[in-house]
Image (spheres, rainbow, N blue to C red):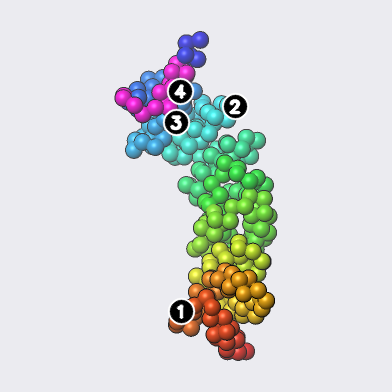
């Protein structure tokens, strides 16, 4: 009963930063013999400047907490293990990535993002492949880590993941520095699909520079050729939505195209295409 009381009191303290609460939590970290009290107190201190020292201060309690079956305890214990840099951290992350609890896997993925992918690529790849929409995962970090892979099969993993999670922004931001051939092919495939979601991948490819223009100029020419000729309002909206093409062609031409300069843009794109032959 006393243990439960201490845990509940510590849990209450961990939810507030008023008064001397943080220092009380620090004292609990230092004087408790209960792994769960240690973890509850540590959870309230993870964002503090001395979090690393505190996490490493009671290795026996941290080790015990890492064996706790309670997912909430294990999540904080994993974060503490990463901060403390435990010698068996890699082994701990492998086990946590295979844990049936989604929150635990999420904490493990955060740990991998902080410590480096290393030999854990297959497990992170599997986690991304089977992730659901709104899963508690660090998607941006996962795409960043796996976006540097030399495995061309990663394109299919990313494709399926985006279909399941809708994490397009995380994908684009995470892969912004990668220049892998399989990623180029995936971005181009996405840029060719109708709909507003094509423009993020298009702009990302446009930032690659080099011969990527040989992929994008034909796409811009095709879209300009398909400009509706009937209703004027429909035509205006269509051309206005081609902003990414307008910016890209303007950069190549060394001038800015207005949204209604459809013929000038198309003439430039066709002329550019002739130089590739």
* Quarter of the C terminus within the rendering: bottom right
Q: Which residue sits at x=52%, y=75%?
A: 259
Viewer-side label of 2, 1: 1
Residue indicated by mark 2: 69
How packed mark 2 is, by other alpha carbons closer than 10 Å (few <14, some 14-19, many 20 or more), is: few
* C-alpha span from label 2 to label 3: 17 Å
* C-alpha span from label 2 to label 4: 18 Å
Of all residues, the one furthest to the top in this rendering is 1
Viewer-side label of 3, 4: 4
> Quick one: 82 or 222, which is closer to the camera?
222
Residue indicated by mark 3: 43
Residue indicated by mark 1: 256
Q: Is residue 58 visible?
A: no
User: Magenta residues, as a range?
Assistant: 6-20
Viewer-side label of 1, 4: 1
**Left or right side of 155 for 245:** left
* Secondary element type, mark 1: loop
In primary-sequence order, the first of circles 1 and 4 is: 4
Residue indicated by mark 4: 11
Is residue 218 magenta-colored? Answer: no
Where residue 178 sits: x, y (%)?
53, 64
Tags 3 and 4 in contact by the CB under 8 Å rule?
Answer: no
Viewer-side label of 2, 3: 3
């Amino acid at each position: 009963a006393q243990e439960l009381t201490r845990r509940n009191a510590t849990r209450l303290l961990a939810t507030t930063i008023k008064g001397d609460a943080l220092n009380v939590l620090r004292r609990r970290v230092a004087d408790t013999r209960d792994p769960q009290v240690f973890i509850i107190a540590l959870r309230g201190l993870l964002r503090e400047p001395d979090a690393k020292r505190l996490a490493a201060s009671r290795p026996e309690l941290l080790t015990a907490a890492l064996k706790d079956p309670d997912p909430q305890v294990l999540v904080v214990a994993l974060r503490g293990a990463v901060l403390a840099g435990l010698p068996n951290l890699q082994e701990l992350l492998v086990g946590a990535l295979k844990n049936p609890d989604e929150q635990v896997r999420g904490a493990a993925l955060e740990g991998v993002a902080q410590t480096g992918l290393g030999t854990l690529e297959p497990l992170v790849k599997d986690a991304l492949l089977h992730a659901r929409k709104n899963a508690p995962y660090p998607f941006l970090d996962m795409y960043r880590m796996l976006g540097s892979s030399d495995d061309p099969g990663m394109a299919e993993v990313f494709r399926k993941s985006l279909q399941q999670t809708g994490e397009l922004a995380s994908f684009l931001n995470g892969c912004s520095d990668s220049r892998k051939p399989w990623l180029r092919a995936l971005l181009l495939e996405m840029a060719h699909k109708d709909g507003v979601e094509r423009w993020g991948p298009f702009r990302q490819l446009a930032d690659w520079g080099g011969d990527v223009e040989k992929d994008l100029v034909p796409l811009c020419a095709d879209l300009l050729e398909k400009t509706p000729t009937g209703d004027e309002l429909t035509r205006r909206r269509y051309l206005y939505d081609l902003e990414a093409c307008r910016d890209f062609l303007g950069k190549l031409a060394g001038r800015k195209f207005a949204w209604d300069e459809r013929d000038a843009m198309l003439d430039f794109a066709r002329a550019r295409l002739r130089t590739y032959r």
